[in-house]
Amino acid sequence: MNIVFLGPPGAGKGTHAQRLMKELNIPQISTGDMFRRAIREQTPTGMDAKRYMDKGELVPDEVVVAMVKERLAEPDCANGYILDGFPRTVAQAEALDTIAKIDVALNIDTPDEIIISRLSGRRVCAACGGTFHVSMLKGENCPACGGELFLRDDDKPATVKNRLDIYQEKTAPLIDYYEKKGILSTAKCTDGGVEENYALVKAALNAMA
Ligand code: AMP
């Protein structure tokens, strides 16, 4: 099954996609993670993307589309995949339609106040890449591996606001786009924690299966 996860930054797309990946045994393809890896490895794509990411802006469509196209051609995508953070514009969705057949677009609908609290409290481990919320941390270091935790540049308050505005303007129209295709399913998420929200995501997915 080829699945697209839609939803504002901080809706929990990555967290739920990782769980679903293990359950369905298909890869999670996160364009944000791919760019962060490219930045760490200082590739030309990474250096180019960083200029946009640090400001909370979208990387140009042609760069993202080329990267995803290459990734979807890899053998582990043959039995399906979860796209997490792609498409983010109608142009990306149209380009995706020329290279893949999407079965379900799962909209993780999450109120703004939950998003803002999640993003500003999110910390990422520099060593293992794990993501944690400050409210769950006991010490200063990563609870999984002891690595150093940091606040992503794009999770800083001013940038979060910019990312949410861009989501509304550029990405939210995809809800309509997939609804018209008859493949949209929405999970109305709450501040009830990961388990509760994952159950809502699974129910929305099962409703389309
Ligand atoms: P994410 O981890 O999905 O929130 O992505 C982090 C940042 O990477 C975004 O704020 C964008 O700057 C960039 N990015 C990730 N995916 C895309 C995409 N599909 N289109 C454009 N920019 C993207």
Image (cartoon, rainbow, N blue to C red):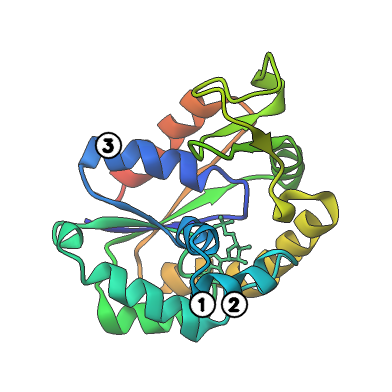
Looking at the picture, how far across and down is residue 58, in whole percent?
63, 73
Where is 37 relative to 139, above or below?
below
Q: Nearer the viewer, residue 31 or 111?
A: 31
Q: Report whether 126 appears left or right of 22.
A: right
Circle 1 Cα neighbour tier, 10 Å, few/some/many (<14 / 14–19 / ≥20): few
- Nearest to viewer (mark 2 / mark 1): 1
Residue drawn at point x = 71 percent, y = 64 percent: 56
| Residue 22 - label | 3
Q: Amino acid at mark 3?
A: Lys
| Residue 48 - label | 2
Circles 1, 3 touching at the beta carbon (< 8 Å): no
Q: Secondary structure at mark 3?
A: helix
Label 2 or label 3, whichever comes before in sequence order: 3
Looking at the picture, how far across and down is residue 9, in whole percent?
62, 53
Where is 3 relative to 73, above or below?
above
Circle 3 Cα neighbour tier, 10 Å, few/some/many (<14 / 14–19 / ≥20): few
Gap in angstroms between the C-alphas marked 1 and 3: 31 Å
Residue 207 occupies which quadrant of the picture?
Answer: top left
Which residue lies under the disc numbered 1?
44
Q: Amino acid at mark 1?
A: Pro
Gap in angstroms between the C-alphas marked 2 and 1: 6 Å
Circles 2, 3 touching at the beta carbon (< 8 Å): no
Label 1 or label 3, whichever comes before in sequence order: 3
Q: Is mark 1 within 8 Å of ligand 1?
A: no
Residue 137 occupies which quadrant of the picture?
Answer: top right
Residue drawn at point x = 75 percent, y = 65 percent: 165
Residue drawn at point x = 14 percent, y = 63 percent: 75
Q: Nearer the viewer, residue 99 or 110?
A: 99
Q: Secondary structure at mark 2?
A: helix
Residue drawn at point x = 14 percent, y = 57 percent: 79
Circles 2, 1 touching at the beta carbon (< 8 Å): yes
Q: Report whether 154 appears left or right of 47.
A: right
